[in-house]
Image (spheres, rainbow, N blue to C red):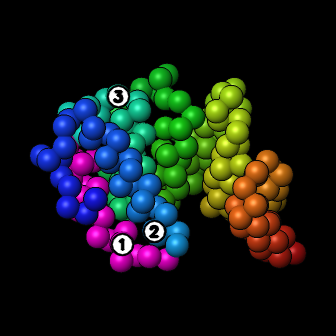
Amino acid sequence: MLAIFPNTVHGRQWVNACEALANVSIVATRSGNRVLAGKLESTMRAFAVELASTSGNDPFVARVLTKTFLAIDDPTTALEAAKKIGDDVKDHWLLYQQSKAELALGLAEPASTTAKRALDAAGKDPKGKARLAIYHDLMSQCDEARGSVTEALESAEAARSSASNDQYKRQLSARVEALKARQG
């Protein structure tokens, strides 16, 4: 995976390759393997740049681009990718990634608005409903960035109660406890 570049892969597979690389990088980062994540960065960027220039106006591709640019710590380009898509056609997956980019750029109010739109849209989609915990968690992060610890705690508790993965539930429990401690 480290040695593949867009010129060695058929164009129809660029989206899949880009997302696969981003997913591996995200897991590597979460596991503390910054070396692997770093090695993937140039390959991910190469695919993302090619995709952005050829099909960045497709909502699904924009979501992959936003996710990829966030994975390589480029929230400005991630937000640019998300904003290429009209608000009327953004699904909850793209809104989620856009909110993460806004949050990474310190844009707490827009991030919160976008996260709320993502959460509302996810609640209307059967696939989104299964992952509501991540949307509540993002709302919590936005609330915290806006300085509202009470709302952040409420969203974190909603995330924890809707989480199905035990490891993620433990992470959310730790977040809830940290927010409770901050609240006093």
Q: Residue at x 20, y 35 (%)?
A: 11
Q: Are marks 1 and 2 in contact (CB under 8 Å)?
A: yes
The one nearer the camera, 96 or 50, is 50
Which secondary structure class fits the magenta region best? helix
Q: Residue at x 20, y 61 (%)?
A: 3
Q: On the image, numbered disc 2 is attached to which residue?
A: 28
The one nearer the camera, 133 or 86, is 133
Q: Quadrant of residue 169?
A: bottom right
Residue mark closest to the camera, 2 vs 3? 2
Label 2 SS: helix
* Residue 96 x/y as whole percent: 55, 43
Q: Would you call the spot at circle 1 few (<14 residues within 10 Å), some (14-19), or many (20 or more)?
A: some
* Residue 5 x/y as whole percent: 18, 52
Question: In the current view of this chain or complex, which residue is farthest to the top?
Answer: 88
Q: On the image, numbered disc 3 is attached to which residue?
A: 58
Label 3 SS: loop
Q: On the image, numbered disc 1 is attached to which residue?
A: 36
Q: Are marks 2 and 3 in contact (CB under 8 Å)?
A: no
Q: Would you call the spot at circle 3 few (<14 residues within 10 Å), some (14-19), or many (20 or more)?
A: some
| Of pointers 2 and 3, the one earlier in the residue sequence | 2
